[in-house]
Amino acid sequence: MNIEQLIKACKKQNLDAQSQLYQRYKDDLFLLCLKYCKNREEAQDNLQDSFLEIFSNIKKFKGNGSFEGWIKRITINKAIDKYKKQSHLNIIINNDILQDHTLINESAIKNIKLHDILKHIQELPPKYRMVFNLYELDDYSHKDVAKLLNISVSTSKSNLHRAKNLLQAKILKPTNTTTKKPGI
């Protein structure tokens, strides 16, 4: 079945079509979930919640825009909703931090595997991970990020800067830390 036929069948709650749709998009959406979640288990939960939402609301998809974009927005919004429920942190803004424009050296990341970069992103504190992913990886503006996460634009910028600094420190951290034995 092509995508239009699958969507039409899913709107009629056809289980075979739902299974095919799941199989078609689960890997891409799981990678998207990994960006926003702190580990694989949380990403699996987010993926399942996203598909429940997709199948529950597929009748609302009218074909305006791409279906892939629609399901990605649902998946990102599920991750944001989970983040908001878990987040009870007040964020203090230091405007001086926004003056520094430290960037990760491109030559330092050329040899790093995608899996390792993703792992470093997952290790970021949730407030930084969310802003980093929305702004850097999914092309949301700071204004949009602020609205989605119920924070100010300056907090979004500050959190992005801090996320980049943490990622830079992790990426540039020496991986080979051998110690010499005394007397050798």
Image: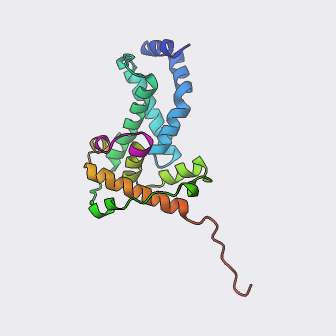
Residue 54 quadrant: top left
Q: Is residue 147 left or right of residue 75?
A: left
* Vertical comparison of 137 with 104: above or below: above
Question: Which region of the structure is painted magenta?
Answer: 135-144
Q: Is residue 168 visible?
A: yes
Quarter that holds the N terminus: top right
Q: Is residue 183 above or below residue 116?
A: below
Q: In the shown orientation, is residue 109 left or right of residue 125?
A: right
What residue sits 50% from the left and 34% below the top?
29
Is 104 part of what is drawn in magenta? no
Residue 120: percent from left, percent from top:
51, 54
Q: Chief secondary structure of the magenta span?
A: helix
Depth check, front residue: 40 or 116? 116
Q: Residue at x 37, y 36 (%)?
A: 77
Up-down relation of residue 94 to residue 1 (above or below): below
Q: Is residue 141 magenta?
A: yes
Residue 61 place in picture, x, y as percent: 38, 19
